[in-house]
Image: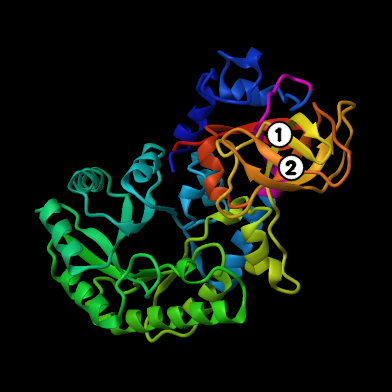
């Protein structure tokens, strides 16, 4: 990665584009704001505001790196979770093998910051995107790129768009499953796709990919059995394609953030030839207080070191129209709501004292959260600290996110959605 480009993020000027920041920092740089070590509640920040906990971030980075190393799997975390090159750099510094993308626009962000190894966990059949990719590959011998193919038609479209290329595009045959997302639905179809890719002058077949997260949504025995059956199919396909691979050590990659323990176990079972087993889990870097907290392998494995939630939203009670209802300055424009609503955890009164607080967010409007109160223990003007579920739909709402130690801002993370 181009660390100079990452460092240059600190030189960007702060202005009205970055919500939540103090008015008096406008015109200064991101680096200047970070270096001032401002306090969230004493130095002019306005709500709502989402922050990242510095200690939890470092814990999660180190924990995942150690876990993967202990099991002999490579990690190419999905960058779509954060779209934050500063965090990509930290993931790579902790041993990540590469970074995963989902589309061409994300890939362009990665390349702007010099990421040299990218898995695009999706099909790429857009002619404009493929022409741009071919130019990138031709201009940079260190750039390693791989994407998915799941149909003979897709292979044909790629071959037609690329034409005669200096460097063929590396592809993985994606195996899906009925009811899942993309991917060939059976072994015979996947074999046809692999043969087409191997025969294409514009492509190079280098492995097999898949995604188990769309097939199950909880940690029940039935869900885990479904995942295991799918992973057995991925192994079967990879072994069956051995003679078609253009490399001696093909990539076999599966893995979201919910079942990566099962993926690692299956991918590291004995193979009849060398493979590169690659996980693509991305949400581990922040974890959450909802979906992943309930399903993460490290949260349900006895003796495992669990991840910690690094995300918190702060919002003020702006209205209390009845004793059992408070309205917060936080809504769908600010927080995730697709995998669970925000979770009130602490209240901070006007005296600056924080105390544990439990209540229920029952609904979100665009800019308001409805909090059902069990007793009359919050006042207008109090701040609530809330845990968030599903980090993938939090980061896209915040172009600049404070990183905090307690209530002190120690850094700012820039996102590019």
| Magenta region, residue range | 42-57
Q: Is residue 351 above or below residue 335?
A: above
Asked if residue 295 lies in the magenta stretch, the reply is no
Q: Position of residue 124 (x, y in %)?
A: 26, 54
The residue at 10%/53% (across/down) is 163
Judged from the image, the secondary structure of the residue bearing numbered disc 1 is strand
Q: Name the side, left or right, on which 91 lies relative to 377.
A: left
Q: Position of residue 98 (x, y in %)?
A: 44, 55
- Asked where in the image residue 401 lies, by quadrant, the reply is top right
Compare residues 225 and 198 and report the one nearer the observer: 225
Q: Crowding at label 2, few (<14), some or many (≥20) Cα neighbours within 10 Å?
A: many
The residue at 32%/49% (across/down) is 142
If the image is split into quadrants, where does the C terminus sit?
top left
Q: Crowding at label 1, few (<14), some or many (≥20) Cα neighbours within 10 Å?
A: many
If the image is split into quadrants, where does the N terminus sit?
top left
Q: Name the side, left or right, on which 14 lies relative to 38.
A: left
Find disc 2 in the rendering and name its residue.
Answer: 371
Q: Is residue 131 visible?
A: yes
Quick check: marks 1 and 2 in contact, CB under 8 Å? Answer: yes
The residue at 77%/25% (across/down) is 41
- Asked where in the image residue 63 lies, by quadrant, the reply is bottom right
Find disc 1 in the rendering and name its residue.
Answer: 328
């Amino acid at each position: 990665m181009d660390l100079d480009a990452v460092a240059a993020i600190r030189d960007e000027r702060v202005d009205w584009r970055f919500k939540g920041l103090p008015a008096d920092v406008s015109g200064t740089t991101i680096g200047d704001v970070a270096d001032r070590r401002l306090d969230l509640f004493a130095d002019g920040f306005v709500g709502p505001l989402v922050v990242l906990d510095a200690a939890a971030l470092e814990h999660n980075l180190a924990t995942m790196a150690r876990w993967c190393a202990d099991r002999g799997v490579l990690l190419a975390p999905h960058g779509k979770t954060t779209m934050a090159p500063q965090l990509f750099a930290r993931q790579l510094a902790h041993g990540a093998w590469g970074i995963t993308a989902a589309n061409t626009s994300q890939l362009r962000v990665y390349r702007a910051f010099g990421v040299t190894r990218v898995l695009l966990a999706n099909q790429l059949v857009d002619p404009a995107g493929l022409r741009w990719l071919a130019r990138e590959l031709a201009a940079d011998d260190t750039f390693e790129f791989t994407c998915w193919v799941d149909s003979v038609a897709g292979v044909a479209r790629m071959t037609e768009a690329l034409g005669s290329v200096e460097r063929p595009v590396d592809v993985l045959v994606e195996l899906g499953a009925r009811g899942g997302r993309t991917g060939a639905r059976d072994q015979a179809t996947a074999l046809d796709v692999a043969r087409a890719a191997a025969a294409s002058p514009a492509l190079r077949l280098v492995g097999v990919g898949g995604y188990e997260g769309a097939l199950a949504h909880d940690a029940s025995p039935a869900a885990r059995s479904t995942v295991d059956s799918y992973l057995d199919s991925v192994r079967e396909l990879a072994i069956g394609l051995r003679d078609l691979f253009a490399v001696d050590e093909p990539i076999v990659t599966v893995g979201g953030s919910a079942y990566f323990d099962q993926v690692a176990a299956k991918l590291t079972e004995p193979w009849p030839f060398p493979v590169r087993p690659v996980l693509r889990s991305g949400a581990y870097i922040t974890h959450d207080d909802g979906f992943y907290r309930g399903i993460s392998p490290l949260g349900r494995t006895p003796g495992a070191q669990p991840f910690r939630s690094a995300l918190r939203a702060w919002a003020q009670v702006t209205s209390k129209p009845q004793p059992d209802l408070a309205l917060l300055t936080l809504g769908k424009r600010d927080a995730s709501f697709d995998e669970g609503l925000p979770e009130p955890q602490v209240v901070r009164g006007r005296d600056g004292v924080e105390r544990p607080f439990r209540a229920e967010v029952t609904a979100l409007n665009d800019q308001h959260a409805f909090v059902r109160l069990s007793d009359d223990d919050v006042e207008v003007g109090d701040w609530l600290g809330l845990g968030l579920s599903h980090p993938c739909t939090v980061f896209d709402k915040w172009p600049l996110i404070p990183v905090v130690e307690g209530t002190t801002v120690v850094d700012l993370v820039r996102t590019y959605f």
